[in-house]
Amino acid sequence: MWLQNPGLVCTGTVSWTVFSSCIFVLVALVLSVYLIFEHLAAYNQPEEQKFLIGLILMVPVYALESFLSLLDSGAAFNSEVIRECYEAFALYCFERYLIACLGGEDKTIQFMERMSLTDSSIPLLKEAYAYGVVEHPFPLNLLLRDWYLGPDFYQSVKIGIVQYMILKMICALLAMVLQSFGVYGEGKFEWKYGYPYLALILNFSQTWALYCLVQFYSVIKDKLKPIKPLAKFLTFKSIVFLTWWQSVAIAFLFYVGAFRGSLAQELKIRIQDYIICIEMGVAAVVHLYVFPAEPYKRGERCVRNVAVMANYASLGSPPDPEEVRDCERSTRTSLGGHNEREKPMKFTQSVRDVVVGSGEIIVDDMKFTVSHVVEPVERGIAKINKTFHQISENVKRHEQRTRSTNDDSYLIPLRSCKPEFSDVHDAVVEGSVSDSGLPSGKRQHLQSKATRSRR
């Protein structure tokens, strides 16, 4: 649109693109803020809604960042860094939201452990995780051990997602520092720039985090059918992946020379920002249907924090026996007053819980991840030090053996220079310890032999 003839781009055209993108950004902001206020006003399930609000905020953050970059290309780098950091945080929020819908960490682990118990009425071939084992696809199965449903699988997924959030923030700070010194070199794959090294680390980290999220979703998707997790999963992934792949496509088009000229290169980043502004306006509309606040408004809650959206969507369906034992299930026809302890929070309390409550959980998860990552590293370093120590000890022992061998080689054996003394030595060895030492016959023979030799 802009680049059919870059030389003829005028102020009117640019103004029109800014105006049109501004409309979509306003739509994204208004709808997102409205949906967030709806959730805060019906803040009846804090564990779910605090991270659900974090997901909804992804749209206005992307929209504002792209619009600011569109207005000022000089701020594009810092704005893009902020967007990528929030992308990692949104990935974490989505995982935490799914866990909250299952009733929390403990119930999620208990659900996974129950999956490992095979029912005799279910054929093994139809049960995806009949033996409670999550197998890795090729070629990861050659490098990684299988995950066992329960704490092992849950902790692996948790660490895999949180590590991306940690590395993303660290790499973002490093990128800003390198950019200030002019050695970041965005888009330049040269060893003297920091971009290729950070890109390699982040691509590996992001791929692993998304792989963990997909594995986690594949395990719990049947349990969360009432809340339609597929729509939520596809909506989230489309925002993350669509923006990334379209940036790759735009960069490829410029690389092959589809758009030429200095002005085209200047508008390269702005095209991406303009498209994101339009997409976020559409995404805000989709969020109204995918992450509605209506189930929370109705107050259908379980005392022990079973997912309220599952209750809302499964009205009229037979209750799960596990949920019947664990909680008091609410229905549309439930009557009577609300428990005083279950009064919804005030608006200010809801905002504080979203900020402070989610922050505490994030800090705890980051501490958990760092401790479980540092501990194996420390064990590995200790093992390496032990190996080097053993090698050093072996070298020292070898040198000592070599030195003792060289010392023994200087010892000269005591041997008789004359043959008659050898006979005496033999006689001494064969004789007794007395002064005579030799038999009389042998002694006389030696004396006569010595006399002849003197003559």
Image (tube, grey):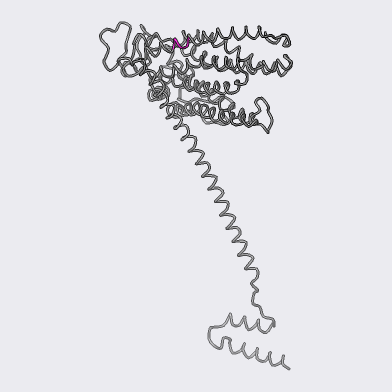
Give the image location of residue 228, x and y in percent: 45, 11
Instruction: Check residue 352 for magenta coloring.
Output: no
Left or right for 77, reference 46? right
> Residue 132: image x %, image y %?
45, 25
Residue that sits furthest to the front in the current view: 11
Can residue 101 be seen in the rendering of this structure?
no
Q: Quadrant of the N terminus?
A: top right
Q: Horizontal and vertical percent for residue 372?
A: 47, 34
Query: In percent of the image, x 47 and y 10: which residue is there?
Result: 290
Between 400 and 286, the one lying in front of the other is 286
Residue 154, picture quadrant: top left
Does residue 189 show up?
yes
Q: Which residues are magenta?
A: 31-35
- Which sits in the foreground, 206 or 387? 206
Q: Quadrant of residue 112?
A: top left
Left/right of residue 31 with respect to residue 445 in the rendered view: left
User: For the point 57% across and 54% down, which residue is it?
Assistant: 394
Query: Can you tell which quarter of the image residue 150 is in?
Result: top left
Is most of the magenta stretch helix, strand or loop?
A: helix
